[in-house]
Amino acid sequence: MLSSAFISCDEGVIRGAEAGARPCAERAKPWVLAATIVGSSMAFIDTSVVNVALPAIQADLAASMRDTQWVVNAYMLLLGSLLLVGGAAGDRFGRRRMFVIGVAVFTVASVACAWSPNAGALIAARAVQGIGGALLVPGSLAIISAAFPERERGRAIGTWAGASALTTALGPVLGGWIVDTWSWRIIFLINVPIAAVAVALAIWRVPESRHESGDVSVDWTGGALAVVGLGALVYGLTLASENGWTGATVLGSLGVAIGTLCLFLWCETRARSPMMPLELFRSRNFSGANAITLLLYFSLGGALFFVPFNLIRVQGYSAALAGAAFLPFSLIMGVLSRWSGGLIDRYGARKLLTIGPAITAIGFALLAVPGIGGSYWTTFFPSMVVLGFGMAVSVAPLTTSVMRSVEDRHAGVASGINNATARIAGMLAVAVLGMIAVGVFGATLDEHLEQMSLSDGTRELARAETPKLAEAEAPPSLDGSERQVLQQAFKESFVSSFRIVSLIAAALALASAAFGWLIIEEERRR
């Protein structure tokens, strides 16, 4: 569901990208928009649809919660880490070329996802999808920047953003219907015809463009170190939820993460064209905006990861209804983001970056209210409305603060860093909040088990289901009444863990509001 927020975040990449080419012929512009909209929508739809399909994937592949987390994180890890590398590769080797390669890689990986026999194969295919996305997303944005002159770029951005927001909003509903009607595997196969259209339009109608100087260096070393460092960090955090913090594998993974990320920072200070120029962080507003992004998107990514499990496995929604439950969030984000962008010059980014995250915090707190049962309109609908409004107020000022905090020549890189920060924050949230959710689930389940008359063996079998969270199943040896009681205990334990996750998300959103008030300074446009 983060895709709705990413669309607004990605607009900064278009605004900040250096065209590096003369605008294309007038007759080619509609085809440029069509190709980039189709290609970008493929990535956005896939991200939002997979979240709705996660409960079905977990059940069908008999996957643990750790496996399910990696289905999301493998994609986000490669996408977030290599996003800036993909943009630089387009500048050097040709934006259309890298866009087509990205679409092709994404599509081949989608087919591999559809035919995955187990969770490990699916995770590997999702990682390859992330590589394709890292070439596809910045490539499509840079193509728009190169094809349209500055006076027409705003309208092109509006068309691209509106179409992407519409497809993203409808994606979870369509994906949920496909999961209910056929199989979760079909949601990956629908990328094939979409990709065919995008590639055909790009090859036949989109002109090639690249950086005018031709002297663009791609920071392959930085990208590789980011993947290894962040991957080791997420692996260690995810493993800690099952094995504890003292295990050799957990400590080793975290040690590798710290060492690799330190080496990454060292290399970035010496690289000819670093993917993340550290001097940008000397700007108070740039550092503050990225800190707000980290906290806000951490909250959003972590909380919304668990919502489909709650709706489908605990509340009894179908996958299609669970996807439709997110429509208020997506539609409000899409409609009001433009409106909130117009408030920046009137009220300033500082006030909006305080009010917006504070409203979002209320939305997360409302997610903690529902128990088991009840009408959607009185349980999850209010939180989705408030979350959508809060994020709509927040996203445009975030992008604007980033763009205004650096010189024009760094605008594209600065926006790319902020974009990558948002995606990496969501990835870290799934790992960290997943670990907390498993811990709370286990503690709550123990309380329920103490009140039930079960044998020691049955208690151990029940506790062994803890890593599955909402997919936990009572042992088949139990009779009907005991089985129902234990299954109810599993549901109540998940609700307890979901509430804690939602309240943590609310606290972090409030912290981001405090950052907005204390750190962001009002600046005139450079």
Image (spheres, rainbow, N blue to C red):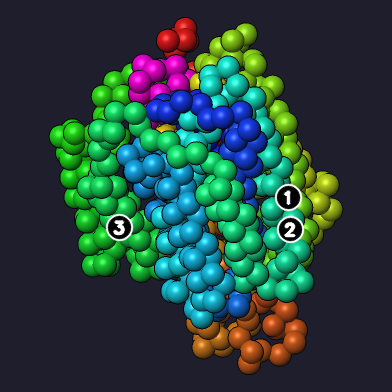
SS at mark 1?
A: helix
Residue at the (70%, 83%) spot, across then down: 482
Tag nearer the camera, 1 or 3: 1
Which of pointers 3 and 2 lies earlier in the amino acid sequence?
Answer: 2
Q: Nearer the viewer, residue 210 or 452?
A: 210
Magenta stretch: give its range: 401-414
Amino acid type, mark 3: Ala
Residue under label 3, please give it.
Answer: 232
* Disc number placed over residue 174 in the picture, else none: 2
Residue at the (18%, 45%) spot, across then down: 263
- The picture places residue 371, in percent across and down from the top left corner, at 73, 55
Within 10 angstroms of label 1, few (less than 14), some, or many (20 or more) residues?
some
Residue at the (47%, 10%) spot, across then down: 525
- Tell me if I can see residue 76 in this picture: no
Tag nearer the camera, 3 or 2: 2
Name the residue at the bottom extreme: 477
- Tell me if I can see residue 124 in this picture: yes
- Is residue 421 left or right of 151 when viewed as pictured? left
